[in-house]
Amino acid sequence: MTKESILVTGGDGNIGSEVIRQLWSSKREDLKIVGGVRSITKKKGIDKRLDNHDLIEIEYDNPETVTEALKGIDKLFLLTPTHPKMIDFTSNLVNGARERKVKHIVKLSHIRADPDPDDEPQINITRLHRQAEKIIEESGIPFTFLRPNFFMENFVNFYLTKGQSSIYLPVGEGKVSFVDVCDIAAVAVQALTNNNDGLHSGKAYTITGPEALSYGDATGILSEHIGRKVSYVNISEDDARKAIRHMGMSDWHTNILLELLKLSRDGYLSSISHAVKEVTGKRPIPFSQFAQDYTPAFK
């Protein structure tokens, strides 16, 4: 049996590892899954079912290693880190994919990557993602863009450390249609494996959860499930900037994060999409289910 090879970049990260997990869980014997990672030896976040020979290290700013990683690959899940050189990274991956005759690229993009200029603001990170999308569009390779909203998993990975009782953010009462990483990965898997007759080619899917919640709403739901009071505290953008810098984040990343939080504060991240149901046939995971699933991580 000839196997179709799928390279999942960012295989050691939140989204990439979940895409790999779901590809494995599909038990498709006609698929070969390759995880593109920063370091094979560290294996942080990498699905344990991937042996070393199913992993390949990728240096995004080294075109030679990128082209080598794409050797024999049929489809590419393209995920680049949030980095000032993101456009260069994308160009290297797309050029390598063209050289290796990759048949389909599924890119993890960002909600509002292509907003209505008369209605919605464009910020640096969404502008970069749109530039990256255009590189793919101009390559001639069939593509699918995934544009997810803020991840629910941010609450457990960044906002609320174990045992912490408050979340401090400058987002006011702005509502967000938070989405579970599992749903983003499920859409990615469908685009990668079920594209008969170009079903997903040329599509851009905005991926959200089923409801728009303020951070106060979200912490209320968390409180109900984890058995202790969790509060949201609205802070000023200046205080947030100081706290982020204290964490050691660069000025570039700090500005990216604060722009995103302002987008949330101003209500631009509250729209609800039905893409998860349309593509996967399943309803998106509500925040209450996420809170229940992750209860042990918050205690």
Image (cartoon, grey):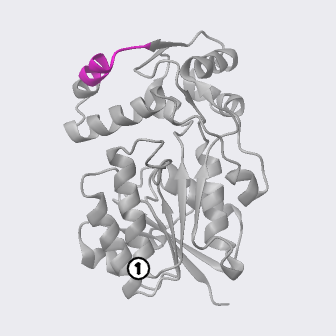
Is 65 placed left or right of 170 in the picture? left
Q: Amino acid at mark 1?
A: Ser
**Residue 55, percent from left and from top:** 44, 68
Residue 81 visible, this orientation = no
Mark 1 sits on what residue?
139
Is 207 placed left or right of 44 in the picture? right
Is residue 48 found inside the magenta-colored segment of the image? no
Start-end of magenta stretch: 234-243
- Callout 1 secondary element: helix
Quarter occupied by residue 168? top left
**Residue 195, percent from left and from top:** 67, 75
Is 128 placed left or right of 164 in the picture? left
**Residue 206, percent from left and from top:** 59, 52
Residue 270 visible, this orientation = yes
Residue drawn at 61 percent across, 49 percent down: 207
Mark 1 surroundings: few (<14), some (14-19) or many (≥20) residues within 10 A: some
